[in-house]
Amino acid sequence: MAQGRYANIIIDISHEKVDKTFQYKIPEKLQSILEEGMCVSVPFGKGNHLRQGYVVEITEKAEFPDDRQKYIEEISTDSVAVEADAIRLAAWMKRNYGSTMIAALKTVLPVKRSMKPKEKKKIVRLMTAEEVRSLLGESERKHQFAKARVLAQLIREPVLPYSLVTGKLNVSSAALCSLQREGVLSIESESYYRNPVKVESARENGKILSPEQERISEKILSDFDAGEKKPCLIHGITGSGKTEVYLSLIEGMAARGKQSIMLIPEIALTYQTLLRFYKRFGDRVSVMNSTLSAGEKYDQYERAKKGEIDVIIGPRSALFVPFPDLGMIVMDEEHESSYKSETMPRFHARETAQELARMKGAALVLGSATPSLEAYYRAQKGEYGLFTLTRRLTGGRLAEVSVVDLRQELKSGNRSIFSRKLQGLMEERLQKKEQTMLFLNRRGYAGFVSCRSCGYVMKCPHCDVSLSHHMGERLVCHYCGYETAKPAKCPSCTSPYLLGFKAGTQQIEEQLRKRFPGISVLRMDKDTTGTKDSYEKILTAFSSGEADVLVGTQMIVKGHDFPNVTLVGVLAADLSLNDSDYRSGERTFQLLVQAAGRAGRGDKPGEVVIQTYRPEHYSIIRAAEQDYQAFYKEEISYRELAGYPPAAHMMAVLVTSPDEKRGESLAERIAKAARALGEKEQAAKGGGTACAPAGLRIIGPARASIGKINDVYRFVIYCKSADYRQLTGIKDKIEQYLGTLTPGEESVQFDFNPMDSY
């Protein structure tokens, strides 16, 4: 429990006031029992009216003199548990990931503002049909045709939708009010929830589980009933039926009166997942993601708080939907990097879900065909329960994988994006009316634009990155949005040979149409999925056979199930190996195995072609073999040797400043302070040396790999330790040090176990 004499409190959790806390003194009677997240009664404003608030921080640091501070009145016993849990979770995130409390609160608290409920009106007949028929005759004699149209309809139907009468029957509201005054009808309003779920499908019972699936489902549910809440990892090959296990588990939770959160890594997966869940749970399932309107989001939160939903589906933000009786959190494709937040606090959904499950007494289930090294490492150490699914439900084998060396293709004279083997297999699929998916491991129409004469690369004037070549001869910065026309000549040597390295999804689509005239192609990348429902439209069109080929970036290889897809082509398998990042091998292996898993999911056999310039790399070899255990053994030995997660922990400290020298100076002072803290701590333990404290390494500061974005300079310091608490302790001390400095334009952010290098 946090210690201190003062409490920083947010009043009422009214979202307009989230940005400000108020400090109160803690009376002696509450000193030993008050905790962060508790709801309290405090005197507020000039009239000192008692208001409810939530404790977000307990501290020894007074913001005002004692004579200007008011005392907390009492701890409220009727506080809303859901909101208190949100406060506690925000406090945990602040401690573990490094951020302001306000930033953590904005992440975990529900929608930013309340919304008025939607209302629909109806017209209800108050008279008998005979009485209305009499009035109808009178209206027709008086040529009151609008009134007559309403009366004629009311004879047939005693209740009518208001919109039907004012719309199709073309009756004015004045005419309806007149009939209301005469006692013929009443106009009634009823509020209803905005429903983002647009699925029309008959309810279905669950499929009969295989022995493997049933064993896993029964074990996890019986452990839950017995109070055993250890997180579980389901390692199942692609097509082995992990989703059916999730459905069984969540159905079991619903039968126990518990709600469940179903996390998916991408919005693109929402529709297919929702369809399967809707068939099982009907309108007791809903979604939460960034494409929803403010009103739709608000209504889903309200439905969840009232227990009107059994399961919510969505990416990491769905984790914070306020269920009163949360029983289970399921995290599908848990290895995906999109589960890590890119803004402060830089939380990972896996660890945050584990803490939320602990707080709520819920079960946490992780699933993947290619588990993250973090999850599998913990399973090997016994921290997670490990379950495996080794058989495809269709009874079919995993797809047959071929690796094509693009260096040999070039030597033999093939300069096409497509290898000869891939072209031949695509011809076969077109003849058989089967579908193909082509996966490109990068985004954009083209990569960098460079001069073939002098080597000059077109760069963004505001960021330390090259510009990307888009259609319409535009050069675009994907970091700050800067855009300019492509010059006719090289700005450095005036050569006309200023060309783009073309390897984007649009380029592939163009090449497909040239190589296979009449082919039907759908493209799925960030440029084609920017509007609401765009994911759903593309996936539905491809699923219904409206295209021969689906071309896309990473989003097309994540969890989709298309039975008629029998060929997957990976066009640039090794591009992700070029990242200056210790996770590049893991990321490449996962992408290739996930891509391979899209082929042959129906009763037809599947084939996969992996095109690469590095066929000898262990990630490519193990992915072609689809052998996770062999890959894990090689990769974890490298991580242990180098001291990278999960064998150890790492904290990146990012310092940004519009002034290069000031930013570099602050980064150097922080690194010096971190080293001094580590040395002091190690000396107290009696180990290590002054130069190299045992178990702790401080690397940097150095210019970040992208040293400037939008005219802001970036410097990074890496701290590595086997003890996570040692890193959070250093983070706390750095925060305290920053609190002693005069506020400037410099900014410092912390990222624990970063998913990407800086």
Image (cartoon, rainbow, N blue to C red):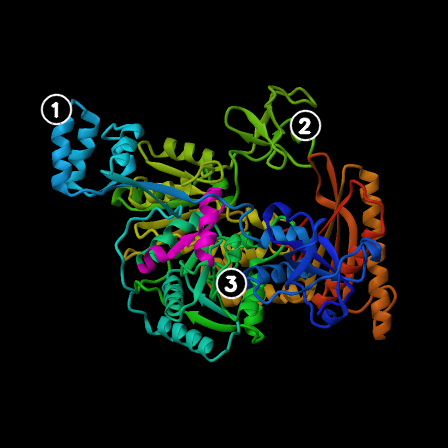
Q: Residue furthest front?
A: 182
Which element is circle 1 on?
Answer: helix
State the residue position of label 3.
371
Front residue of this view, candidates 548 and 560? 560
- In the image, taking residue 599 as reference, residue 226 lies left or right, namely right
Which element is circle 3 on?
Answer: loop
Mark earlier in primary sequence (2, 1) = 1
State the residue position of label 2.
454
Q: 10 Å neighbourhood of mark 1: few (<14), some, or many (≥20)? A: few
Check residue 326 for magenta coloring. no
Q: Residue furthest bottom?
A: 226
State whether the magenta stretch is mostly helix, strand or loop.
Answer: helix
Q: Quadrant of residue 212?
A: bottom left
Residue 709, percent from left and from top:
69, 37
Which element is circle 2 on?
Answer: loop
Mark nearer the viewer, 3 or 1 = 1
- The numbered disc on residue 245 is none
Mark earlier in primary sequence (3, 1) = 1
Front residue of this view, candidates 133 and 432? 133
Magenta stretch, residue numbers:
280-305
State the residue position of label 1.
141
Q: 10 Å neighbourhood of mark 3: few (<14), some, or many (≥20)? A: many
